Image (cartoon, helix red, strand yellow):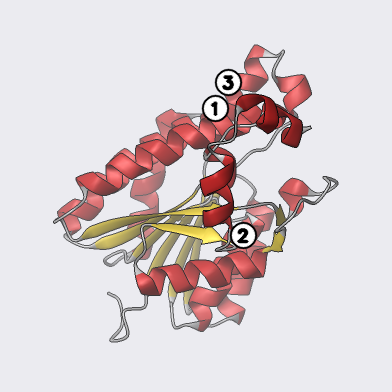
Amino acid sequence: MENAFGQPQNIIVLGGSSDIARAIVKKLCAARAHTVVLAGRNATLLDQASAEAREYGATKTETVLFDAMDPSNAVRTIAECFAKVGDQVDLVLIALGQLGDQRHDENDASAATGSAMVNYVWPVAALAELRHRLVEQGRGRIVVLSSVAAVRVRRSSYLYGGAKAGLDRLCDGLADSLEGTGVTLQLVRPGFVRSKMTAGQKEVPFTTGVNEVAENVLRGLASGERVIWSPPILRYVFALLRHLPAPLWRKIDR
């Protein structure tokens, strides 16, 4: 159950080894979260994230292994995570993302499908199961890491951006479907974030670090806003960019 200050106590993180997820978990644990279940595919990184959570105040941490390339395991993964919490779940963070190599993957059917699986298909399967469980529970929050890449898809990353756009739009409708159930869904739209996923890439205006994203997420959790932008100024930047004429948008992308 959330504490008297409305802060989540029992947390599940799908994609628990991502840099952004780890930064968010550390801040949640510092704010009194005590049970953290981290799910992902890399056991070593999940163990490291678990140790961090305990260092920042968690009293119970568990890990669950799954492969996001196989959506058939989503229901089993969610069930295992809930069982390891052993109590009502306050918050589920979905932090899956695979940027890939656009120039290679766009000509490779298997790689292109893999991007869609990780960035869209597996999260959709997980969200269906989460919706069922949390509505039955009568309360809870879902936070989904989207991206500003979903707002207007770029040629230079259309596989990633297109999948995130699908997830982003689906979550908008899912959030509407949760009205009146006691369950809420919030989207996070970060800009370019310095992390292992973006290592080696050229930074762009309004680049941030993982700790800045985590701070914006915690502020968004407190305010309850439907979409959390990081940094917040991108809300206004993309209000303009999404309406640029296509030839100008392509020039900016180059």
Q: Tally the marks.
A: 3
Q: Nearer the viewer, residue 209 or 139?
A: 209
**Marks 3 and 1, how far apart in space?**
5 Å
Per the model, the C-alpha gap separating discs 2 and 3 is: 24 Å
State the CA–CA distance, disc 2 to disc 1.
20 Å
Q: Mark 2 belongs to which amino acid?
A: Ile
Residue placed at 52% from the left, 41% from the top?
66
Q: Secondary structure at mark 1?
A: helix
- 154 shown above or below 134: above
Earlier-in-chain disc, 2 versus 1:
2
Give the residue displayed 47% in from the left and 82% down from the top: 31
Side of 232 where 203 appears, left or right: right
Q: Amino acid at mark 3?
A: Thr
Residue that badge 3 annotates: 113
Which mark identifies residue 116? 1
State whether residue 23 is above or below residue 175.
Answer: below
Mark 2 element type = helix
Instruction: Locate residue 209, reporting x and y percent.
Output: 70, 64
In the picture, the quarter occupied by the C terminus is top right
